[in-house]
Image (cartoon, helix red, strand yellow):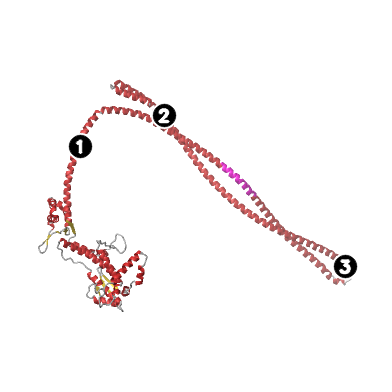
Amino acid sequence: INYANEKLQQKFTLDIFRSVQEEYEFEGIALGEVTFADNVEVLNLVEGRMGLISVLNEECVRPRGNDSSFVSKVNTMNKDSECLVRDKFYRDYEFGINHYAGLVTYNATGFVSKNQDTLPLDLSECAKKCTNDLIYSTFQNYGAEVASKSSKPKKPGRRGSGSLVRATLWTKFRQQLGTLMANIAETKTRYIRCIKPNTYKKPLMMQQGMTIEQLRCAGVVGAITISRSMFPNRLEHDITLDRFSCLGNSAYSATNEEKKQDDARNTCRADVEKLLFKLLKSMETVGDDGTVKQAYVTGKTRVYFRAGALEYLEAQRLLALGDNAVTLQRMVRGYLQRRFYLLWKRSAIKLQARTRCWMCRIRYKAIRFACIELQSWVRQGFAKDALMERRRCAKATMIQTHWRMMVAMVYRYNCIQATIRIQAIMRGARQRPIYREELKEWKEASLLENQVKMLQRRLEEAETRRIEAEKKAEGTVTETVVVYKEAEAKPGAAAPAAAAPAPAPAEGVLTAQQKTLMDESGKMLEYLRKEVFKLRSQNSQIRTDFDLLKENNQRLMDANASAGASFAALNQHAKQISRTNAKLMAEINQYKQQVSKLSLTQIELKEELKMKQATYIAEVHSRLQYQKTMKQIVDTIQARCRDEWLVEVIIAMSEDCESA
């Protein structure tokens, strides 16, 4: 890339700096020695006989060629070159080159191996047979170049390693670059320098140091320096005469026209020298050696101006053109003023004619004005009548509108009330069966609740009776057993007395008592057994009833819960109905206020109608008075006016007014 940039910089140097010198030599202008930076030494270092390309190709051919030996040979063979930089801190495979843009340090690692990376012959042959036109044409040209180079005769006594040297990458690149530069040299070159203003990539921001460095590296600074040091401005002879002949005598252009037939170029150059010598006499400078240095130099086809000379001529030209413009303006203004004078004269004549005509028509206009005034009064009366009629119609329409609106609002209010009444009746008819059903359910629930309470009370009383009966039965059994035990114990206690003599009937009585007691005890026990069985049966029945009551109680509680939910829903619905009722009452109050306002508006409109009626009556009276006055005016004009035509016109107008 740097090699290609150096070649392009050399092309730029040849096109800019050397072309300037050639142009000055062609024009016959003595140009002092101007020094400028040239990169020929850098190009000799790269592509010279002992340059980098030759040394690298030789290392590629050598059996044990490497990168370090390549750098060593370059430093040895080009030690006198100022462009090659050798630093003691460089390694064996590093070297530096002072390019036109600045110092660049190169790392030669891999130079030899990369330079030998060539395209195999079988691959190139395969590419030549490709069906793609671009690849086919490219490799055909490549094959033709290789064949032409390989067909060159070899000198005797030299080894056949030229094909290897030519096949390196750097050799191919140099050949392609040479072809490119040859093609560029055949064209008309235009240079475009792209300058990067800042490194932050932001708009409206410029880093001066970086920008100046880019301009210096691109050679723009050098081109501007040599241009400003000698002649920054130039013009051709005919353009110079055409632009600045207005500053000199008018004879230049005439003599120039006369002498063009013989020798136009010499004549034009002489005229330019005469003109510029006179104009730029004040800008001459005297050197240290006493020589006079003019502000311009005349060449064969062009005039070269030093710094400031062309600007001075342009300023003087602007001043001269300003003076000429003033002269032209003076003449044009005089011509315009003469035209205006003639125009004003013709206008004055026409104005006098029109004034006389106008004064002749004054009396006609006076009569016409009187007629127009009379017509305007009559039309004003008609227009006022029409206006009042329209106003009355508009007010009547407004009264009708408000009355119809009030009737419609009353009808709407009655419809709303009827609708509300119908809705209330329908909602009542729909809610009464529901209410009766819910009331019936509530009564049944209350009755069931009372029955449950009565059953619970009866259950408690039965339980109490059962407990008392059990206690009573247990007490009776206990007393019977005690009595029986006492009866058994009495014969044992009386045994000692039995030894004594006693009468026989006493023992028989005790036995009867015991039997009686035993019978009674058996009957009592049987009775107690029956009572216990009966109580147990009652207890089981009561328990069954108690379970049924529990189930009924649960059902009643569920019914009570559903009744409570229904009651809450009814309560919510009642609240909603009450809110709707309140809203409707507010709307009714609003409608009442609107009706009151409309009634007030109706009263005001009636009052206004009365006032309009009075105004209409007054206008009728004024109309009658107007007709009387018109009749008096017509009679007066007939009695006093001598112009019969005017009297007839006024009478006809008055009749038209009365008929209208």
Residue 169 location, quadrant: bottom left
Q: What residue is at 30 percent from the left and 76 percent from the top?
A: 60
Looking at the rendered image, the disc whose residue lies closer to the viewer, 3 or 1, is 1
Any part of residue 626 in sight: no
Task: Name the one closer to the observer, 274 or 322.
Answer: 274
Any part of residue 242 in sight: yes
Element at badge 1?
helix
Q: Position of residue 612 (x, y in %)?
A: 42, 31
Q: Which mark is residue 195?
A: none
Closer to the chain start, of discs 3 and 1, is: 1
Q: Are marks 3 and 1 in contact (CB under 8 Å)?
A: no
Task: Name the one closer to the observer, 531 or 435.
Answer: 435
Q: Which residue is mark 1?
A: 344
Task: Name the one closer to the observer, 613 or 526.
Answer: 613
The kind of residue on which mark 2 rests is: Ala
> Label 3 to label 1, Cα distance in Å?
193 Å
In this picture, is 426 found above or below 488?
A: above
The kind of residue on which mark 1 rests is: Trp
Closer to the chain start, of discs 1 and 2, is: 1
Q: Which residue is mark 2?
A: 614
The kind of residue on which mark 3 rests is: Glu
Q: Position of residue 355 (x, y in %)?
A: 23, 31
Q: Which mark is residue 507?
A: 3
Q: Position of residue 384 (x, y in %)?
A: 38, 30
In this picture, residue 527 sits left or right of residue 393: right
How many residues crowd mark 1 within 10 Å: few (<14), some (14–19), many (20+)? few
In this picture, residue 512 sits left or right of residue 424: right
In this picture, residue 455 sits left or right of residue 110: right
Q: Specify start and end residues of the magenta stretch as a single range.
A: 421-440
> Label 1 to label 2, Cα distance in Å?
63 Å
